């Protein structure tokens, strides 16, 4: 129950307002909540790609699901932002980012079928040191 509703019920209980006045306030509050729901756009899901290293953050990419759906044909551009040595390490571990079907991924996310981390890998790179690669939905 919202704080506002609880406060109205408390005012009725304390005799500060009548039950009829409380009912009118609750109805007005409900109308306001419905109006806000209609005007507030739903929060969209975001695909987040993080590559953190010992020294610095290497990649910090946030893609709204709507952008992924619209630009899924150009997803290779985002993949090219990931340094080559990291992509090579991922491929050694059986993850070929170039083969990800972003349209299908967007549909799975939209349907709520993808909720866990898509990629969660720790890499020891000879040049960069320890790297952490994470791809997840938020």
Image: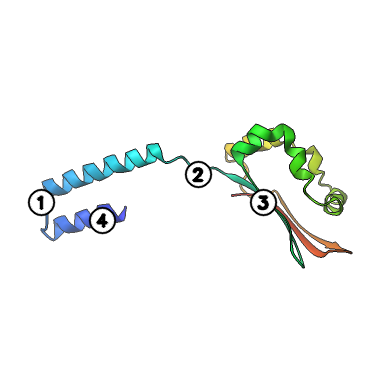
SS label for mark 1: loop
Instruction: Point out the frontmost of discs 3 and 2.
Output: 2
Marks 3 and 4, how far apart at CA:
38 Å
* The image quarter in which residue 107 lies: top right
Vertical order, 122 against 117 (above or below): below
SS label for mark 4: helix
* The image quarter in which residue 57 lies: bottom right
Marks 2 and 1, how far apart at CA:
38 Å
| Residue linked to disc 1 | 18
* The image quarter in which residue 111 lies: top right
Marks 2 and 4, how far apart at CA:
26 Å
Q: Earlier in the sequence, mark 1 or mark 3?
A: 1
| Residue linked to disc 2 | 43
Q: Is residue 16 left or right of residue 76?
A: left
Q: Position of residue 22 (x, y in %)?
A: 16, 49
Q: Earlier in the sequence, mark 3 or mark 4?
A: 4
**Label of residue 57 in the image:** none
**Label of residue 6 in the image:** 4
Vertical order, 73 against 14 (above or below): above
Instruction: Point out the frontmost of discs 2 and 4.
Output: 2
Marks 1 and 3, how far apart at CA:
52 Å
Marks 4 and 1, how far apart at CA:
15 Å
SS label for mark 2: loop
| Residue linked to disc 3 | 117
Q: Is residue 112 left or right of residue 98?
A: left
Residue at 20%, 54% (x, y): give it.
9
């Amino acid at each position: 129950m919202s704080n506002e509703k609880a406060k109205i019920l408390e005012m009725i209980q304390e005799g500060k307002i009548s039950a009829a006045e409380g009912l009118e306030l609750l109805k007005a509050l409900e109308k306001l909540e419905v109006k806000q729901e209609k005007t507030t756009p739903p929060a969209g899901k975001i695909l987040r790609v993080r590559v953190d290293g010992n020294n610095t953050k290497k990649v910090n990419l946030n893609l709204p699901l709507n952008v992924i759906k619209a630009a899924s044909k150009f997803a290779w551009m985002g993949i090219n932002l990931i340094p080559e040595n990291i992509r090579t390490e991922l491929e050694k571990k059986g993850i070929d980012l170039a083969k990800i079907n972003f349209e299908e991924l967007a549909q799975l996310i939209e349907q709520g079928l993808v909720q866990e981390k898509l990629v969660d890998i720790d890499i020891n790179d000879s040049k960069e040191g320890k790297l952490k690669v994470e791809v997840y939905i938020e």
